Amino acid sequence: MVFSFRERSDTIHTQFKKGVLELLVLSIVDEKDVYGYELVEKVREAVDVNEGTIYPILKRLTNEGFFETYLVESTEGPTRKYYHITAKGRKRQQEVLEEWKSFSKSVNQFMEGREKE
């Protein structure tokens, strides 16, 4: 399959997003319990993302034991499902954060070296 430059750029950008979404989701829920749409809005502060991208991540993280959920009645609409991070989730968040720091540091050092050439 041959990609145009624009298609390849979009694909690469999508892969960058996928690489950080788990970290963002874990970090946001680590700050406080949130419901799905609220979480989407917080992620959007950092990365342009569709709502449909976040819910599968939430489902996977919940199934893997990183989150627990509970329901809260809402005066503004249907009952909301809140996500709460578990001890296992906090550990995973720290692991992913360390991986991200190491990765971004390596890339930044490489790029800074390239700029000097």
Image (cartoon, rainbow, N blue to C red):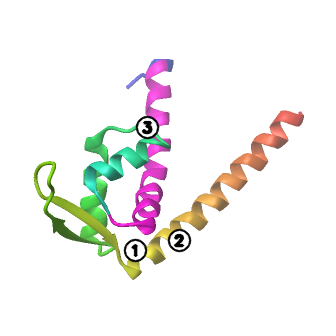
- Rendered-image quadrant of the C terminus: top right
Q: In the rendered image of this protein, does residue 75 appear above or below residue 96?
A: above
Q: CA distance from mark 2 to mark 3?
A: 22 Å
Q: CA distance from mark 1 to mark 3?
A: 24 Å
Mark linked to residue 95: 2
The residue depicted at 42 percent of the width and 41 percent of the height is 44
Q: In terms of secondary structure, where does tag 2 sit?
A: helix
Mark linked to residue 14: 3
Using a 10 Å C-alpha cutoff, classify the residue at mark 2 as few (fewer than 14 neighbours), some (14 to 19) or many (20 or more): few
Mark linked to residue 74: none
Which mark sits nearer the N-terminus, 1 or 3?
3
Q: In the rendered image of this protein, does residue 10 appear above or below residue 105?
A: above
Residue 106 percent coordinates (x, y)? 71, 54
- Indicate the amino acid at tag 2: Glu
Q: Which residues are magenta?
A: 6-33
Query: Which residue is identified by label 1?
Result: 89
Main SS of residues in magenta: helix
- Indicate the amino acid at tag 3: Thr
The residue depicted at 81 percent of the width and 42 percent of the height is 112
